């Protein structure tokens, strides 16, 4: 039966009064709900020191609401100065006061109701708001301001969406979102609140106070035992943690932080991490969980000290010392020590914990982990990536990793590395192992894949490189070859006097062949075919139908074959709007299917043409190979290098730069290193080189690589830099074209011998 019209009207009015009561009436009840504001059971002011006899228990939730309210009320009376019944406007402690609109807690702003305004008063201790500014007005809420509070500046996005400028103040339990129509008023409130926050003394947690007490009484075993016995917060617990052990600012995180993961506040993340640590005790395979904890610490560096403190807590007087769960904590602490370095106070507390463990459990697994962690902390300087799964497994056994480095023309080398081994250390070890110590040329490690190749920085940790390889292996397709480390020439200083029967000549031959395949040696197709035939002779000796044939792209530059194909025809762009519209409509129907079919047929014809060109090129290479019968492998390698050496740019380290003129096989300019007065980066994509009275600018994405190589060349050739001035240099005036920017590095120009020549090629 349908409702009468009057009943419908009554229901609508009732619903409307409900909305009004929600938006306006709840403000009167917020005084009771916010009476527990800033009830901080785990925080103390810096000046409020307690004696050693005071027991700081593990924070737990109270089961009785009345007891908790009583505790909160007593604490609130000590934190907030009670206001008298006088007029609100006559408060002598008020710093800033005025009308602001507040978002009702738990409600949704309705578009037909204008937000209600409240009278806000900022004092040196809190931010209070009242129902009005009249005498005897009731205080509806208060937010105690400490050094952990934070305030957000107004943003344009909120103004575009709501028409109001917002001021957000974060407290321990509550967040005030205030709105005003004027930007200058919002900025005034933000500056005032921030000034009050900055004036507060730093807040210290019981854990920090106890860390300081332990450091002060480290020579008194009786006092230390009393501290640990009377303060359960320092010992293992199986209960959840409801507050972090260290102080963190209130408020949300910046979601623009690096990393694909999204995080909440630091306090919430600290509590979540403790829950993850407790899961380690029962995990059969703790490696993924450990890597997740390490990744969170890498994304949120302020949590590093917190995790160290949590791990120290869980490894202090556990119920089963040396058990599986306890060892999992020690293993994660080992991974942390090889990845992150804590702050000095936490580092001192951690070292004390390691000494205490070794003295209480000598010759145990915990003592062995403690010794390993102490040594790792002396070498750790920070990581770019978290340890890989393989590295975590190795660290759990306190062993070293085995890294495979490929050497062109020689078998792959296996090198034992730790989490602190740099690329320069491995390169020096390989130079010594392969007998290249007397070579004047420079060597380095390279990250090599099918698409790119780049040198590894001398100070780069190989553990980070292996982690990147592990991450790329999960992203790349199956047919793509995995990334690998390769040991190669880094800088050519002398290529004429390399013995042909040495390992270095084999490295030189392989690197020359890579230059040919990458198109860095501009020469004729006839010479490229001869080089491919010499390559076959060096691999398989004399021609034989049973000899294995490498793929053509491993012998001949692929870009030469692609250059033979006709370029795709491009239709001129249609200028008429109607023509573009008709073309778009036709592309979406039958004509679109026909065009797709035509493109597929054209691609198939191009692939067929490419196969024909490849077959004819391979036939020409085989014919030249037959003419090399009787030539030995050393002679073939020497003839190959001799042909490549005919190009003037051989022996130079080549970098890709953008030129405004067509590329030429000859160098555009050439100069000795002794003529270089300075070099450096003008910006992230421009390399500047000053040669006597000339300034050369090169647009390149390899600015750092070029600068690093030039530094290495000059250092190896005996050049020494003059000392840097103590005072910071100022930027030169724009009117002086010969002045050098601040980033340029001056080098000494006198040379005692003829240095090598540096060339820049297109």
Image (spheres, helix red, strand yellow):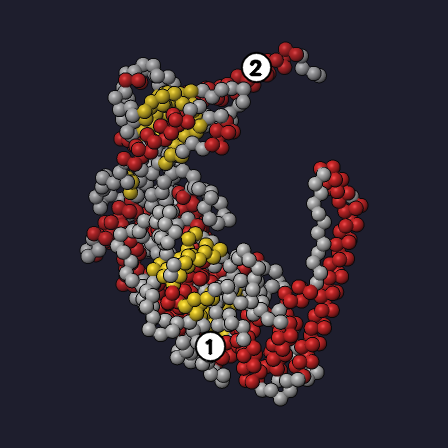
Asked which quadrant contains residue 322, the reply is bottom left
Q: Which residue is mark 1?
A: 495
128 or 415, which lies in front?
415
Name, please, the residue furthest toward the bottom.
630
The location of residue 697, given as percent across then percent down, is 45, 56
Observer able to see residue 108: yes
Asked which quadrant contains residue 311, the reply is bottom left
Asked which quadrant contains residue 294, the reply is bottom left
Q: Which residue is mark 2?
A: 13
| Residue depicted at 53% across the width and 57% down the height | 659
106 or 241, which lies in front?
106
1 or 331, which lies in front?
331
| Residue depicted at 27% across the width and 63% down the height | 359
Q: Secondary structure at mark 2?
A: helix
> Crowdedness of circle 1 by 10 Å Cα count: few (<14), some, many (20+)?
some
The location of residue 307, given as percent across then percent down, is 38, 51
């Amino acid at each position: 039966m349908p409702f009468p019209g009057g009943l419908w009207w009554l229901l609508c009015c009732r619903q409307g009064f409900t909305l009004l009561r929600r938006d306006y009436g709840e403000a009167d009840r917020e005084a009771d709900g916010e009476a527990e504001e800033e009830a901080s059971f785990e925080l103390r002011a810096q000046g409020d020191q307690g004696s050693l006899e005071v027991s700081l228990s593990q924070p737990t939730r109270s089961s009785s609401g009345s007891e908790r309210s009583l505790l909160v009320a007593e604490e609130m009376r000590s934190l907030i100065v009670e206001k008298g019944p006088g007029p609100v406007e006559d408060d002598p402690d008020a710093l800033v006061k005025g009308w602001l609109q507040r978002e009702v807690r738990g409600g949704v702003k309705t578009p037909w109701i204008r937000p209600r305004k409240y009278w806000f008063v900022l004092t040196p201790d809190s931010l209070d708001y009242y129902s009005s500014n009249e005498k005897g007005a009731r205080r509806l809420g208060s937010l105690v301001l400490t050094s952990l509070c934070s305030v957000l500046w107004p943003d344009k996005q909120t103004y575009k969406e709501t028409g109001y400028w917002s001021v957000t103040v974060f407290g321990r339990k509550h967040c005030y979102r205030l709105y005003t129509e004027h930007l200058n008023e919002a900025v005034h409130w933000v500056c005032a609140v921030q000034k009050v926050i900055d004036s507060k003394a730093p807040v210290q947690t019981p854990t920090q106070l106890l860390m300081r007490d332990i450091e002060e009484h480290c020579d008194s075993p009786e006092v230390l035992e009393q501290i640990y016995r009377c303060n359960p917060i320092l010992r293992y617990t199986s209960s959840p943690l409801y507050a972090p052990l260290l102080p963190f600012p209130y408020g949300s995180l910046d979601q623009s932080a690096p990393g694909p993961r999204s995080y909440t506040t630091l306090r919430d993340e600290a509590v979540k991490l403790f829950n993850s640590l407790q899961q380690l005790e029962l995990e059969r395979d703790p490696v993924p969980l450990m890597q997740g904890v390490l990744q969170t610490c890498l994304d949120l560096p302020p949590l590093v000290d917190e995790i160290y403190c949590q791990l120290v807590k869980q490894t202090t007087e556990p119920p089963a010392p040396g058990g599986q769960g306890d060892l999992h904590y020690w293993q994660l602490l080992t991974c942390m020590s090889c990845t992150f370095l804590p702050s000095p106070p936490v580092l001192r507390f951690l070292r004390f914990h390691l000494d205490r463990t070794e003295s209480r459990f000598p010759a145990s697994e915990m003592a062995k982990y403690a010794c390993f962690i102490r040594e790792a902390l002396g070498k750790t300087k920070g990581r770019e990536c978290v340890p890989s799964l393989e590295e975590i497994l190795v660290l759990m056994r306190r062993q070293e990793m085995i890294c495979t480095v490929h050497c062109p023309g020689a078998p792959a080398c296996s090198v034992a590395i730790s989490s602190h081994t740099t690329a320069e250390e491995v390169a020096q070890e390989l130079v010594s192992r392969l007998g290249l110590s007397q070579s004047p040329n420079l060597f380095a490690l390279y990250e090599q894949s099918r698409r790119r190749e780049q040198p590894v920085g001398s100070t780069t940790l190989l553990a980070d490189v292996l982690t990147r390889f592990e991450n790329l292996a999960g992203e790349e397709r199956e047919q793509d070859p995995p990334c690998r480390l390769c040991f190669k020439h880094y800088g050519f200083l002398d290529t004429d006097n390399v013995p042909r029967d040495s390992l270095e000549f084999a490295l030189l031959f392989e690197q020359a062949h890579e230059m040919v395949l990458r198109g860095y040696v501009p020469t004729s197709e006839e010479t490229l075919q001869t080089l491919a035939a010499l390559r076959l002779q060096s691999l398989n000796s004399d021609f034989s139908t049973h000899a294995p044939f490498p793929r053509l792209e491993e012998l001949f530059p692929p870009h030469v074959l692609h250059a033979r194909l006709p370029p795709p025809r491009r239709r001129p762009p249609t200028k008429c709007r109607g023509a573009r519209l008709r073309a778009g409509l036709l592309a979406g129907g039958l004509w679109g299917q026909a065009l797709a079919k035509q493109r597929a047929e054209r691609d198939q014809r191009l692939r067929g043409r490419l196969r024909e060109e490849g077959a004819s090129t391979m036939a020409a290479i085989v014919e030249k190979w037959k003419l090399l019968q009787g030539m030995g492998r050393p002679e073939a390698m020497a003839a190959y290098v001799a042909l490549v050496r005919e190009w003037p740019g051989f022996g130079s380290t080549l970098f890709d730069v953008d030129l405004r003129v067509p590329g030429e096989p000859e160098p555009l300019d050439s100069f000795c290193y002794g003529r270089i007065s300075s070099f450096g980066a003008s910006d992230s994509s421009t390399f500047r080189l000053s040669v006597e009275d000339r300034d050369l600018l090169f647009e390149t994405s390899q600015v750092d690589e070029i600068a690093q190589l030039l530094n290495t060349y000059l250092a190896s050739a005996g050049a020494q830099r003059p000392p840097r001035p103590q005072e910071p240099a100022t930027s030169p005036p724009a009117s002086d074209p010969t002045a050098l920017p601040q980033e340029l590095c001056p080098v000494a120009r006198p040379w005692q011998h003829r240095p090598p020549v540096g060339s820049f090629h297109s």
